[in-house]
């Protein structure tokens, strides 16, 4: 009977919200039923198909009463983030505070670059508006506009512009990132009714296992959409291919839209025929991060060379330095093919 078939064998599509030991908590499309706790079919294990948080999966043999099911297949991923490990993230909400802790341009830049490098849409959110003057805020807004960003100015404490944030998050899978103390947890608590947050006991905060576990979980927003929190980390590393760095700056992308440099592997420092001018505020940040990316590349190449070592030095806000102890060898450039692939990857990801 078809009626029976529909109830048991119809293709059920859902989203993996969390992975708990060998179980996957899946929210079915439509969202009428609470989540199902699912196992992964042996066939998937055999072919080595991993299931990630954020994955769209096909669920079979739902046991509605028991709240169980089995994951039969994983649909192709649109995006795949590494840290946190989440598939199909649509956007990153980067939260910083305007004060307390103070807004540090280099640190902000570092987070922006890291976010841009994922190729996923990025929106900046500046919290604690209540702590600064209106004219100060406007000046910061103008400055960030010249960087290529239009932030959402928030005050979680005073409930200012929360609606704009809500609108941005609606029906999307969003990862919240940002340094410690800027108000990420406070914002999440505003957005998601307490009942939906089942964590809390360990650290009192959403999805943060006190830095011990790499627990990743997507939380359901009341009006549609899923949200993941990332544990506060202050210094994202910038292990990029140096040639790609310029594309992580909106200002750089804009300059390169107008044409191309004489040398295809130009690093935009003072090469002849370079079209990347130095008359933009963050050019200094570009040079700083470029050094880091180059040192990182050298580091990776020296891994196979046991005689050389490299120290990661952190000095103050936003500055990491890899310092080769030995004279660093001339670093091998990334092949054109790899570069093109990477850029292609970046662009295609960005267009989704
Ligand atoms: N003045 C002011 N304080 C705020 C605002 N939002 C949050 N805070 C305060 O800022 C402090 C840090 O907030 P949290 O939400 O814990 O910050 P977090 O980003 O989650 O920090 P980590 O958990 O360390 O990553 C708390 O004392 C909040 O009460 C705001 O809009 N204005
Ligand atoms: Zn150039």
Image: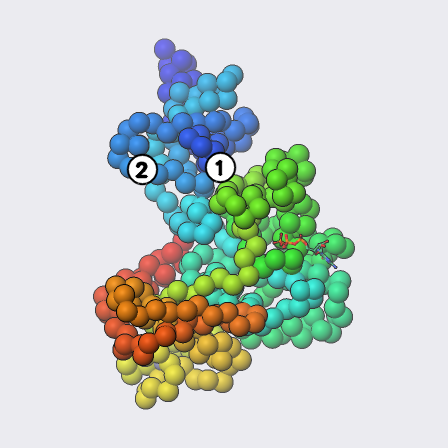
Residue 92 in view of the camera = yes
Q: Residue furthest front?
A: 307
Residue 197: x %, y % from top left: 62, 38
The one nearer the camera, 351 or 139, is 139
Q: If you read the primary sequence from the N terminus, does the residue marked by circle 2 or circle 1 appear first?
A: 1
At horizontal 31% and vertical 37% (from top left) the residue drawn is 49
Residue 123: x %, y % from top left: 55, 59
Q: Which quarter of the rendering shows the N terminus?
A: top left
- In space, the residues marked 2 and 1 are separated at their CA atoms by 17 Å
The residue tagged 2 is 49
Q: Relative to residue 8, is residue 215 depicted above or below?
A: below
At horizontal 50% and vertical 18% (from top left) the residue drawn is 66
At horizontal 50% and vertical 43% (from top left) the residue drawn is 213
Residue 160, quarter of picture:
bottom right
Give the SS element for disc 2.
Answer: loop
The one nearer the camera, 194 or 280, is 194
Q: Residue furthest bottom?
A: 272
The residue tagged 1 is 18
> Answer yes or no: do the residues labelled 2 and 1 have beta carbons within 8 Å?
no
Give the SS element for disc 1.
Answer: strand
Q: Relative to residue 5, is residue 50 depicted above or below?
A: below
Drawn side of residue 157 relative to residue 296, left or right: right
């Amino acid at each position: 009977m078809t009626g029976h078939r529909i109830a048991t064998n119809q293709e059920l599509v859902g989203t993996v919200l969390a992975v708990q030991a060998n179980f996957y908590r899946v929210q079915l499309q439509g969202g009428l039923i609470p989540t199902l706790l699912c196992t992964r079919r042996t066939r998937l294990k055999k072919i080595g198909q991993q299931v990630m948080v954020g994955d769209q999966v096909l669920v079979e043999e739902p046991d509605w009463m028991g709240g169980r099911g089995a994951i039969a297949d994983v649909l192709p991923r649109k995006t795949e983030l590494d840290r946190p490990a989440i598939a199909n993230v649509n956007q990153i909400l980067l939260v910083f505070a305007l004060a307390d802790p103070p807004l540090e341009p280099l640190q902000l830049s570092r987070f922006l670059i890291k976010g841009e490098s994922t190729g996923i849409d990025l929106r900046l959110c500046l919290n604690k508006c209540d702590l600064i003057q209106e004219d100060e805020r406007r000046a910061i807004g103008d400055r960030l506009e010249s960087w290529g960003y239009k932030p959402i100015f928030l005050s979680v404490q005073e409930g200012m512009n929360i609606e704009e944030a809500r609108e941005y998050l609606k029906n999307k899978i969003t990862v919240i990132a940002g340094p410690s103390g800027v108000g990420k947890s406070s914002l999440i608590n505003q957005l998601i009714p307490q009942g939906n947050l089942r964590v809390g006991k360990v650290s009192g905060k959403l999805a943060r296992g006190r830095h011990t576990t790499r627990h990743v979980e997507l939380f359901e927003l009341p009006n549609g959409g899923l949200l993941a929190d990332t544990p506060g980390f202050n210094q994202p590393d910038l292990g990029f291919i140096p040639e790609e760095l310029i594309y992580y700056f909106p200002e750089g992308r804009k300059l390169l839209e107008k044409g191309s440099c004489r040398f295809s592997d130009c690093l935009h420092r003072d090469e002849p025929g370079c079209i990347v001018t130095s008359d933009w505020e963050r050019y200094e940040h570009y040079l700083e991060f470029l050094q880091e990316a180059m040192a990182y590349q050298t580091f990776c190449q020296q891994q196979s060379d046991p005689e050389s070592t490299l120290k990661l030095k952190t000095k103050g806000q936003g500055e990491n330095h890899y310092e080769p102890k030995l004279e660093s060898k001339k670093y091998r450039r990334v092949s054109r093919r790899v570069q093109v692939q990477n850029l292609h990857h970046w662009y295609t990801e960005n267009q989704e």
